[in-house]
Amino acid sequence: MQLLHTLCRLAAPAGNEASLSHFVQRYVTEQKASWRVQPKMLVGAEFQDCILLVFGTPQTAIFAHLDSIGFTVRYGQQLVRIGGPAVQTGYRLVGEDAQGPIDCTLTVDEQTGALSYEFNREIERGTELTFHCDFRETETTVQSCYLDNRLGVWNALRLCETLENGIIAFSCWEEHGGGSVAYLAKYIYEHYGVRQALISDITWVTEGVQAGQGVVISLRDSLIPRRAYVDRIRLLAREAGVAHQLEVEGSGGSDAKELQHGAQPWDWCFVGAPEEHVHTPDELVHKADIYSMLRLYQVLLEKL
Amino acid sequence: MQLLHTLCRLAAPAGNEASLSHFVQRYVTEQKASWRVQPKMLVGAEFQDCILLVFGTPQTAIFAHLDSIGFTVRYGQQLVRIGGPAVQTGYRLVGEDAQGPIDCTLTVDEQTGALSYEFNREIERGTELTFHCDFRETETTVQSCYLDNRLGVWNALRLCETLENGIIAFSCWEEHGGGSVAYLAKYIYEHYGVRQALISDITWVTEGVQAGQGVVISLRDSLIPRRAYVDRIRLLAREAGVAHQLEVEGSGGSDAKELQHGAQPWDWCFVGAPEEHVHTPDELVHKADIYSMLRLYQVLLEKL
Amino acid sequence: MQLLHTLCRLAAPAGNEASLSHFVQRYVTEQKASWRVQPKMLVGAEFQDCILLVFGTPQTAIFAHLDSIGFTVRYGQQLVRIGGPAVQTGYRLVGEDAQGPIDCTLTVDEQTGALSYEFNREIERGTELTFHCDFRETETTVQSCYLDNRLGVWNALRLCETLENGIIAFSCWEEHGGGSVAYLAKYIYEHYGVRQALISDITWVTEGVQAGQGVVISLRDSLIPRRAYVDRIRLLAREAGVAHQLEVEGSGGSDAKELQHGAQPWDWCFVGAPEEHVHTPDELVHKADIYSMLRLYQVLLEKL
């Protein structure tokens, strides 16, 4: 879990994913010699801070978002949310501005809910703050901020080791309304004819989805994927004997929103481990769910 | 109204429109020999469950959504909405899962508004339920669930009988946020240069729109179409002497949302009959409005 | 400020921008002989009521929306909002229907907030009404309805006088959910390879942004632009010594929404003067901020 720990520590709030993108690019460059198939890596100005990895003759694309939730420093001591972080007075926030590194504390006004920071100096307007990473591992679990979605990124990178055919898309802005999947999806569809997608992301433990019971195949969240495609995925999971659970929600979203609303006929399905303590510094995922997630992706990328 | 009755009975909740799509495809194949012009039918994986019919040299495209509102079975007895169905304890819901056909009853918790079903067995997670169809016809009206939008589909299919030039697009997911019109619109614009649209759908009886007073030309709902285009449609309706009413709303939407926000310069206008008891099992439309709707589409497809 | 006054007086509620578009087209045709570089003007059905001006070899595109907020006449005396106008009983509204010119008064129901008009006759259903223009100029300020966004249009037109390389896009529907930038952005990207944007629009005076302190560079509003791009703009502004302020908001939007969500990898930044009395007939902007806005655009279009 060393790789996961590193991914969780790197700051990449939505809109400023550059440092995590560079880390992933270096990781791919260094590791790919040991992979079964050498992917083509597409990066550069035409992809902003996103990354595409193309393996063999792809049939399916995996979307894993790089960005995280966080906070932007507004005026005075005020903070504005990036995405939808949970808030609690005392959360430790880190960042950097021209005056140097920042390690401060979140304050939530009990009356108004207004967010601010406490620090020994004023922080420059527009500075992004993210949760301090306290990575905790037990025999059966991992716990940290930003398992959503560094685990989805980790899953994609581990999948690369054995992947023969497929596309991995590392996207940006997912936590804050999206903004990159539309063009990634267009590029993939037009250049490779691929229109099957899996969303490598983290979902919620709920009354119907338990920790430790396997990867989640989501039948719907705020959006509804095409039934025929989801049914194929369920069948492959059953045939392969991979532990999994079915989710049915009326809210929540993912990179799939941009696939659903884009100008290509994408089929998509959210497939990911569930977590507790969503969007807090203490997101918790069971290792069994992580491994069944990776296993299911290996099966699906081979057979879908 | 036998065709309309059949259309209303077929289950096609947003995301699972396959059976209705197959019915329409068969209908077109069987009927088209009797039509004035033989259309080209575009279907297949690139169009998911949508259908395009291209007649002659098209200037205008008609969008009619196949999907309906409904419910998804969540955990235990819980239900989650597909789109925005009206809910009332006692509504009869039907569906099917691996254990066989389902005919159950909707329950609305008076305190919380939570939705559930009553049935003699548990229904499988993720199963879609739709309103039971009780089709009622009088001299002057039709009443059923899903007149929105099986009447829009019916209007398009009846229009096919005499249509010489134009495109019919049968779309999916309209009731649940959309997801197909973006790519249909792109395909149509790029392959046929068409950028005029009519939305063949059903609207509301309100204080300004009465049942039986003719088809509705909508000047706006939550979105505002380009004035110059709507004015052309109004002029053609007046010149042809087709009974019609003008609608002005601040809310509501249609497939036009995807046209308005897509990356082609579509002009669009909602043209459809008004109904009472919107999104209930008892949607009611006056036949006079249905016939003026079909008549206006015949005029517009010839002259627009 | 004669040009600005003229721009403010012309009615162009979202969806009916034709008359302002024609005015701008005539202005360009008449004035361009005196400009440093002759632009190519792209207009016509493929652009609806939008206008593209292409100067030299463009690297950056400027988006300035033509449309304004307003009201649509519904049934009886009722009004429905176009965009988000401020409302107050007594506001003077103007328009025109088939019976002639309209000069009426807005009424806001104190209990329900319902909007209506008072006039000496009934106004035709669907008629658009806009604020009456009372243009006021002092040594240091201008005040009028619709400085948002006629000042953004004015800024773009004044920039044309010296512009050597760049694209100006005059867009529609910005105040009411958008609808033109998606296709303008696609056209620009595909024909000119341009993917850098500046949003020439007006923002708000707040506790962190003061009138008279210079043009605003927005670090975020409801959306978050890519950090690396905004940092380049900040650096160029500092190097050029142009008075400017930094904005950080959690709400508000602009034409940038469509760039962010479109299928091209646009970098964008909102750069515009701040105003008081937002979306009222009395929008107020300091001339110093207008001139620093124009100056910053001149710098950015040269160096970005």
Image (cartoon, coloured by chain):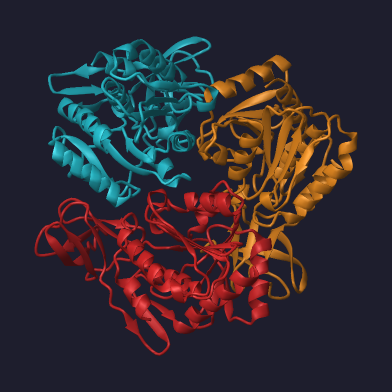
Chain colours: A red, B orange, C cyan
Q: Residue at x 20, y 29 (%)?
A: C295
Question: In this rendering, is residue A138 above or below A31?
Answer: below
Q: Residue at x 32, y 31 (%)?
A: C279
Q: Residue at x 17, y 38 (%)?
A: C244
The quarter of the picture where the N terminus of chain B appears is: top right
Question: In this rendering, is residue B101 above or below C34?
Answer: below
User: What is the x, y in percent for residue A90?
Assistant: 22, 71
Q: Residue furthest bottom?
A: A139
Seen from the viewer's position, the closer of residues B206 and A150 is A150
**Number of numbered discs visible in the structure rendering:** 0
User: What is the x, y in percent for residue A122?
Assistant: 11, 57
Q: Quarter-wise, where is residue B54 in the image? A: top right
The quarter of the picture where the C terminus of chain B appears is: top right
User: What is the x, y in percent for residue B257?
Assistant: 55, 40
Q: Quarter-wise, where is residue C296 in the image? A: top left
User: What is the x, y in percent for residue A280?
Assistant: 33, 70
In the visual, does A174 lie left or right of A130?
Answer: right
Can residue A164 be seen by looking at this rendering? yes
In the visual, does A70 lie left or right of C109?
Answer: left
Question: In this rendering, is residue B89 above or below C30?
Answer: below
In the visual, does C37 lie left or right of B284?
Answer: left
Can residue B114 be seen by looking at this rendering? no
Q: Residue furthest left?
A: A120
Seen from the viewer's position, the closer of residues A47 and C81 is A47
